[in-house]
Amino acid sequence: MIKYLLLLTTILSLNQPIKSQSPLEGRWDITITMSGKEVPSWLEVNHSGLQTLTGHFVGTGGSARPISKVNFSDGKMSFSIPPQWETGNDLSVEGTLQGNSLGGTIIFPDGKNYSWTGVRAPSLRRTTAPVWTQPIRLFNGTDLKGWHATGENQWKAVNGILHSPKTGSNIVTDDRFNDFKLHIEFRIPKGSNSGIYLRGRYELQIADSKGLETLKDQLGAVYGFISPSEMMAKEAGEWQSYDVTLIGRMITVALNGKTVICNQEIPGITGGALDSKEGEPGPLLIQGDHGPVEFRNIVLTPAKSPL
């Protein structure tokens, strides 16, 4: 009898209808309109079990935050998440799905309300291997030619070093890139912090991480998304290096000569990105708003345009 009941239970479970994928599922590149300015954001929605939708959200700053439940019915969606670096109430999002477009309103923890729109994020899967072109030395060591600051400029070229002596503006390349290999060397004093935004959208973290755990907000990480496999940080004040290969969303990172991320997918933009237009080429952005930092030997090897 027991064997019969177990067999019957198995048959019944196999005959249960499989819930179809919700049209809301997937990744969304979001643009929030704030006081006439477009600010990037990102949303991912997944199913959990038979009837629950969960997800992750990247706001105007900070890292990807988990969403315990995304409500969705009759084309209407909503969710709330606790504040991260903000203070105040929960962040609340409401929207409407129309085909492959989303749009709605977002209420920040400070109570301010803004409109937003979203489009499905591109897969960025490449169909052929990259063909590398000639390396480009992005910093000539003598001036800031080829770069521009995002605000009042505190960056200087000093004896072959791109130097930000204090907290100030970020700095961005004039040129934009698709797939590439990058070599870059950096140095920060104790307690300082910076980051390198690949295509202006995906932050490769720079932090004073010697002796710390391999977390998603420490040196070697794609901020908020991918933690390094090993902590290879040197002492603050020493020169360190990144060697990065970015092909579509797939990234490989060597920190101080050791591969710590091997061909992993970056799901979406990180907080503080220049925009959420993931299908387009983008610049190299270096953070200068988190403390003093120095860079040198910045060499980028572009691939021919992806197919």
Image (spheres, rainbow, N blue to C red):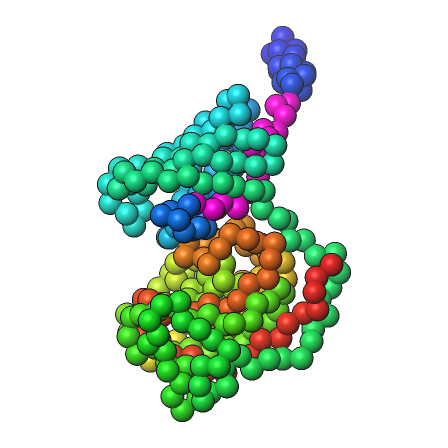
Q: Position of residue 10 (x, y in %)?
A: 64, 18
In the rendered view, does 53 fall on the left or right side of 212? right
What segment is highlighted magenta in the picture? 18-32
Instruction: Find out whether residue 123 is within the magenta segment.
Output: no
The residue sitting at the top extreme is: 1
Residue 19 in the image: above or below residue 141: above
Q: Position of residue 111 (x, y in %)?
A: 27, 38
- Quadrant for the N terminus in the image: top right
Which residue reaches farthest bottom? Answer: 159
Residue that extends furthest to the front in the rendered view of this protein: 36
- The reply to whether residue 114 is visible in this rendering is yes
| Residue at x 40% of width, y 85% of height | 157
Residue nearest the observer in this picture, 7 or 169: 169
Q: How many marks?
A: 0
Give 18 or 88, whichever is nearer the viewer: 88
Q: Quadrant of residue 286?
A: bottom left
Left or right of 97? Residue 67 is left
Q: Position of residue 55 (x, y in %)?
A: 48, 38
Which residue does the image show at 53% across and 21% down from the upper left? 74
Could one spot residue 69 in this view of the protein?
no
Considering the image in quadrants, where does the C terminus appear?
A: bottom right
